[in-house]
Structures are given as C-alpha cells and as structure tokens.
Image (spheres, coloured by chain):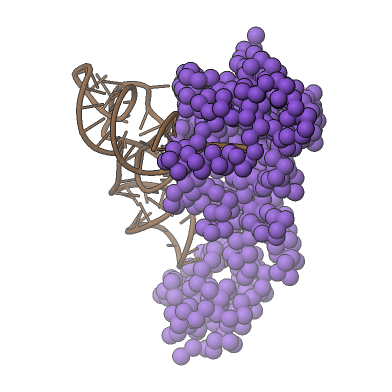
Chain colours: A purple, B brown
Amino acid sequence: MERRVRVRFAPSPTGPLHMGGVRTALYNYLFARQHGGDFILRIEDTDSQRFVPGAEAYILESLKWCGITIDEGVNEGGPHAPYRQSERREIYLKYALDLVAAGQAYYAFDTPAELDALRAECEARGETFSYNHAVRETLATSLRLTPDEVQTRIDRGDQWVIRFRMPAGEEVHMHDLIRGDVTVNTATLDDKVLYKSADSLPTYHLANIVDDHLMEITHVIRGEEWLPSLPLHYLLYRAFGWSDTQPAFAHLPLLLKPTGKGKLSKRDGDKMGFPVFPLAWTSPEGETAHGYREDGYFAEAFVNMLALLGWNPGTEQEIFSMDQLIAQFSLERVGKSGARFNPEKARWFNAQYLRHKDNNELTALFLPILAGHGVTADPQTVARIVGLLKERATFVRDLWDLSWFFFRAPEEYDAKGVQKFWKGDNPARLTELRSLLAGLDDFTATALEPAVHDWVVTNGYSMGQVMNTFRLTMVGQSSGPAIFDICEIIGRDETLARIDRALAQLGQGA
RNA sequence: GCUCUGUUCGUCUAUCGGUUAGGACGGCAGAUUCUCAGUCUGCAGAUAAGGGUUCGAUUCCCUUACAGAGUACCA
C-alpha cells in the first residue's frame, strides 16, 4: 500500500530561523508538492528554557515570504492538532511509560550535580563519561532499585527522567535517501533521556518519534546534524513496534560559512556583510540582524539561490520558479557534502530576477523610493526609465543612484569630468549643439542620434569629445545610459535648460 | 578522544568505469558603445595523497590527510 506523502518542518522557536533552516523547509515543501502530499509545520518547543518570544511568529512569516505554504500547522490546524508540542504534553508520558513497562526504558533519579560529578571523575581519568549499559545498573535507576523504592522516590517528589535502554552491542543498519546505507554499533551510543519530570516534557527524541508516528509522516528530511541520532530513532521506532510505518530519512548537507571554518552561524552575517536570516530580526534583548527581505532581495531570488545550495537539476539551468523547482526537485540529486554559502552568487540571482521583472512591477516598487527622495513622477515615464536601467542594478534601491538625473538637473559637475572635457573648443561646440537641438522637430532618441551624428561628422568634430561634454552637462557625471534616451525622456526644454545651466556655471571655456 | 559523514577549478557544482573533466559565480583580456554598467567572445583555474581492483579509474575498495557534525535532563 502506497502511503500518501506527508513531510514536516519542525523548528524549535529558540530564535530566528536562519537560511539553513529555510532551505530545510523548502526541500520538505518541494518534496511534498511534487508528490501531491502534505507539508506540515510542527513547533518543537519542548525546551522551556530556550524559548524565545516572537520566534514562532518569525518562522511563520519567513515561510510565508518565501512562498512556502503550509497544509497543517499551528495556524492552519489539521487532523492531528495541536501542532505545538507544548500543547501536546499530556500525550508523551504515556509512551515513555509504555517503554518502561516493556523494559525498553527506565527511570533514573540522578541529579544534575551527581551527573556533573560523574563526568568530572571520568575526565580526571582522561575518559569520557557515557550514561550507558556499563554504568546504568550501578546508578540510581529503576533497573537497580526495587519497584517500591522507585515508587517511594516518585511519591516524595524526587525529580526523575526516563532513559532509553540502549542495547549493549548491536549493529543498527539504517538507510538514508541521500547517504545510502549507514551502520552503527550501539556500543558507542548512550542512554538518552526521553522524558523529564522537572517540566513534564519529553525531549526531542521522544516527542519527535511519537509525533512523526501520530502525524503519519512518511519522509523525514532534516539537517545532517541529526544523522548521529538516527540509530536511536530507528531503535525507538522498533521499541514502539512501529517499524513498518517508520518514515524514510534524508539528511541534508550543512551550509558552511563563506570563509574560514565551520557551519554557517547566526553571527556570521553582520560580521561578513550579508544576511543569514530571511527577515530582519530584533531579539527581545534588542539585538538586530539583517534579513534578505529588508536588504532588498526578492523572495523568488532568495528561494532560487537556496534551492541550488545543495541540490542541482543535473542540467545547466539555474533560474527556477517555485513551480519549476517543484517539478524538478529530487532528493537523489541533493549533494552529500557541505555547501559553502557565496554571497556574491546571491546578489547575482537577485540581479537576474530584477532584470526579468516587468517594468510596471518594478515601477510600483520604485515609486515609494522616489517619493522618499521628494520626487513624484508619472508612472509611465518611470516605467520607461526603469526599463532603461534595470540591467545595471542588483536591487530596486540601486535604481535611484542610476536614475536620479531623470528627475532633477545636476547642480554640480564631476570635477574629473570637467577637467577632462570642459576645455578647448568643447564649450563652443556645445553652444552649436544647443542651436541644432533647438531646431529639431523630432526629439526622440531615434531621430536625435543620426541628426547629431551627421552634424559631428560633417563638421569634422570628435564624437567622443562632443558627446562626453554633452553628457557632463546633462547628468553632471561621466556615466549613465545612452544620452539620447535621456534627452528624449526629459524633453527638449529641459535638455536646453541643462546646457544653458552648464554654460553659465562652468563658463564658455578657454 | 570516540562515533558518524564527507572531500572535483577560489566558490556552487556536472561526471552514475572510457569526456580535450562540462557549466555557473567571481577574476582577467578583447569586442561593442558617446561614458559607465551591461552584453558578446575568449583566457586562467579542479578530480586531497598513496595504495589496490580493472584493458581502463574522478567514478569501486583500503589506508592516510583534511573538513564537518554528534558526543546535554538543547533541539
């Protein structure tokens, strides 16, 4: 029987989601959509100590911005609600107790202080303490204590945890959709805590397995940092008798920092000048971090860039819409090794999306920026200007620096440009050019270009000298789009006015 | 330390035993142009090292090196 594909993204609300987390969510989403399955968002807030207010809302908004839609989750509800583990707390104890009853788990009464002492003791001998088969019978556990002693301790309010009884020396054979077969001997594993009485909450391992089972998850796609926990998870499914419906696993390679060593961390971004978060974030303590959205990235570009960081289609296509990603994504083509994030490539993706955007759409985004500079302009004119300049920009906000001279005349002239071109006969040529322009009927770029060109050639002038001088008067600098396009858009009157102004301000020349 | 995972141009990657090892970002050069940007064309640049297996290894196996992750009553 083929089960309906159901995947989940299960973040912990301990802070803003960083781009690695977004990528995990994206891959889950793509996989679900491709298979016509369900994408579930589950909040794993079983660590009351690390809970950060606002983090959950941040996660939801991030996914929404990326265009990742949720089928079942904290806001959407669903057949397995609630989807926040803190609201499911009464579910987990029963399962932990089942395991104890079956001899697969046991109570442990060690205090944190006792465990610290044990660790220190081992360290002094140059060993690493492991809570495992070798020591569990010697500690205060239900394996050594009588049932009465256990009950007495519980009744008098001693704090306890339930630990998994890891088999002593067994080879666990696992399969990962990305990495293939992996085998681990349980002798190297320890007895993980499954449930803690202190806050009446399960740990990740128990909550995760129980919820994935209850929510009928078919594929677990998560970060590589979980690979070492996989044998425990396999064993838990077996202990519960759920092996037949156990989900398939896929562990994604990590995202590495652009330079230096280690995985991409939340601190890297502001240090290296690029965002690591989808959205800007302000912590409860007031610390702020940049976000792709606020830095001017298009969500589509961000998603596209993220999708290619660890996955590739096997073709040379690089630009993908979400629908194309859904159609082409496959876990088989996800790489095995960590991907070093390259901010330059992220910018390139944004530039690609910018130039392929419709002029009217860009105009709508640019108009508020113009307003911020005190400019109100006709949207149709702005659309023409945007069309002329979008290939030169990476972000919408770049458009202002590239186009300001369409909206206001230069008030000063670039010193180097003046030095280079405001000399010799050039000012005089400009005066002649002014007369020529004043007499032309057709002021479109296509008419201006040949008219001026002919005039230059006929008189034996230098095109470079004339045009660069002209440009200097029009935009005050030595860069920009084709000069006749500028003339056409700002019109004859303004063009002539700018020439007059330059002549007046810079003088008639030597 | 131990366990697991990984290793192709500076970076992201293709190659599923036989290729001049391909593409993209970045870099460099040339072309185009009234400038700058862009665009186009070209150039430089990699299979971590050593052993095997094989007629033939980037590809399969082993060792070493390096890297990453995990090793919590965190996820």
- The mark total stands at 0
* A95 relative to A274, above or below: above
Where is residue A63 drawn, in percent x and y?
A: 69, 41
Residue A471 at least partly seen? yes
Q: Is residue A182 above or below residue A273?
A: above
The residue sitting at 54% across, 54% down in the picture is: A268
**Image side of residue A68 versus residue B71, left or right:** right
Residue at x 59% of width, y 29% of height: A139
Residue farthest toward the top in the current orientation of the protein: A1
* Viewer-proximal residue among A289 and A196: A196
Q: Quadrant of residue A461?
A: bottom left
Please, which residue is most extreme toward the bottom here? Answer: A510
* Nearer-the-camera pick, A370 or A85: A85
Q: Position of residue A85 (x, y in %)?
A: 74, 33
Report x, y in % for residue A181.
Answer: 46, 21
Residue in the foreground of this view, choosing between A353 and A484? A353
Q: Position of residue A157 (x, y in %)?
A: 77, 34
- A428 and A140: which is toward the camera: A140
Q: Is residue A476 above or below residue A172?
A: below
Q: Residue at x 70, y 51 (%)?
A: A360
Q: Is residue A221 visible?
A: no
User: Which quadrant of the figure contains the N terminus of chain A?
Assistant: top right
Classify A249 as above or below A368: above
